Amino acid sequence: MTAAADHVTQPKTSSRFFRRALPYLLSLPALLVCIGILIPFFTAVYYSLLRFRLNLPALKGFIWFDNYINFLSDPAFWNTVKISLVYAGLTVGVELLLGLGIALLLQKPTRFNNVASILLLLPLMTAPALAALMWKLMTNPNFGILSYFVSLLGFHNFKWASDPSTALLTVTLVDVWVYTPFIMILLLAGLRSLPKAPFEAAALDGVPRSFVFFRITLPMLLPYIITASLFRLLDSIQQFDIIYSMTQGGPGDRLMVFQVQSYLEFFQYTNVGRSAALLIILWAITYLLSNVFIKQWLKLRERAHGGA
Amino acid sequence: MDHTSGLERAIRGILIGLVLIFFLFPIFWIVLMSFQTNETILRIPPSIVFEPTLTNYSALITGRLETTAGNLDIAFMKNLWNSVLLSTLSVALSLILGVPAAYAFARFRFRLGEDIAFTLLSFRFAPPLLVLLPLSLYFKQLGLTNTYIGLIWVYQLICLPLILWIVRGYFEDISPDIEHAYRIAGNSWWRTFRKIAVPLAMPGIAAAGLLAFIFAWNNFIFALILASADKQPVTVGALAFVTASGIQYGQIAAAIVLSIAPTLALALYAQRYLVEGLSLGAVKG
């Protein structure tokens, strides 16, 4: 039908060629920006195969995969892998549970619940780097309000992010503060869009609420949960803002996640090759994860468009 | 669900209260701190009773910090201005680039169309440093380091995918029939695009633009690497300012408040669009 309509009504001036080129012309400017970004990407791939230190330019040369191979025997690298995965798993796990809990609490669309859910978005609207700064002030050992609270509980001299044993916990707390609302709002949107019929039927039959939750609510909410957690997982494994502004990867190498490590490799040790190799490894991990995400997302999209 | 007992309602109420305290207390406390002098901030035990002062804010606005180590000039207002400039211009540019592209992806099936769309989206998932570190070397060669143009271009990494995907979804939700009718009446596609498609998708475009603005404002890593002091936005500036001013905690708090207030105000004002935009862009597509 479209083709026929086009055929009849096409103004004389617009040629067949123009019509075929139009979508490309429309997306070309965005595409050019995208190509501009592909250049630094491939440059990074190239750098990762070099011995390339900014302070020793004479040594620059191809070493193929030596940067990567060197990482395999480097405990610092494995620490980076471990801490990045632990950080991502911990933050997303806590945020998912908490976000689901809050979404369930606010599920009924009452006026109070709506206002509360909007207020809960405020942390999400705070720049993560600045949120980290806020928490740094609140956990200051001298005057921080949180340090005062824990001292009331008997923990004097609690060092928060500057103590290796509590640093991970502290940054996780900040991440949870910033990003739980993200999961909450997606799951809330999901919960409120679920069809009513199964729940009414279950209520009529007097089905226990735990059964309703685990057998009806949770499975129907699953697509939303998957989308939200994969979104967060991709972000979290690349966390930089919160960790860098709070501890710069420290104390020691306690919070040396991928992006902080490669930032320091680049600017502190001026080792471009190693820095690039680290980022390529991180990219490979996120690429795999985002493929899972995009497949899932496409499936959802298909279902949403086809099922309606 | 409707036959909830009084006890259950009470428990729910308490839980929601705790959740609200956890998520809102930090903002509340920093705002309180920003109206205090070091003297009252450093009190033990802390108290919410104090005589509010505006000195922290006036020090930031005039750019003169009086510390125990002497007077210090800071460019905090310049940082704020940089944030306004960078976020606004970046969003404007990505609307100009993104809306036509989103329209193309939504309305036409063309070869490589989906591939291009996915490539653009995939930048959202790549580690930012992967692009930024090589770029910092290129920028040096091109003379783009520490320029607004260079930064605005890089900010497209955040804004463009967001706008593309949200606006595309809106265009797809609008039936093309109205556009066809308008075309049949003898109007060019460009006129149709301007007079019919864009106005119909306006809520989506506005939501996407607001979201992109907030993300651009909150960005930290791009400017940290590509901008030095005089082009830095508040996210980076505030961090540097903390180490520089050291002991004036009230001023640090005031700086945080001034840095997050604009986006918070915008977000509150536009919350309905934003929630819609967030859930549409992420889940529905």
Image: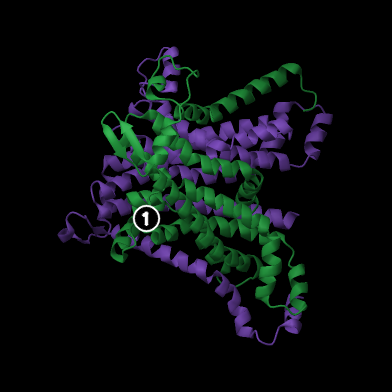
Chain colours: A purple, B green
Residue at point 78% right, 78% down?
A: B185
**Quarter of the image where one finds residue A222:** top right
User: Quarter-wise, where is residue B152 in the image?
Assistant: bottom left
Q: Quadrant of the C terminus of chain B?
A: bottom right
Please give the name of the residue rendered at 64% of the width and 45% of the height, measured from the top-left corner. Answer: B275
Q: Nearer the viewer, residue A120 or B246?
A: B246
Image check: B187 left or right of B251?
right
Q: Residue furthest bottom?
A: A12
Horizontal and vertical percent position of residue B111: 57, 73
Give above or below for B244 relative to B130: above
Amino acid carrying label 1: it is Leu
Above or below: residue B123 compared with residue B4: below
Taking the image as drawn, is residue B178 in sight?
yes
Q: Position of residue B4 (x, y in %)?
A: 77, 22
Residue B123 visible here = no
Q: Secondary structure at mark 1?
A: helix
Residue drawn at 36 percent across, 22 percent down: A141
Residue at the left extreme? Answer: A58
Give x and y (percent) for residue A228. Answer: 57, 43
In this view, the residue in front, A242 or A293, is: A242
In the image, residue A34 sits, relative to residue A147, either above or below, namely below
Residue with the mark numbered 1: B132
Q: Residue furthest right?
A: A204
How many marks do you count on the picture?
A: 1
Where, quadrant-wise, is the N terminus of chain B in this rendering?
A: top right
Q: Position of residue A269 (x, y in %)?
A: 23, 47
Mark 1 closeness class: few <14, some 14–19, many ≥20 residues within 10 Å: many
What chain letter is assigned to the residue under label 1? B
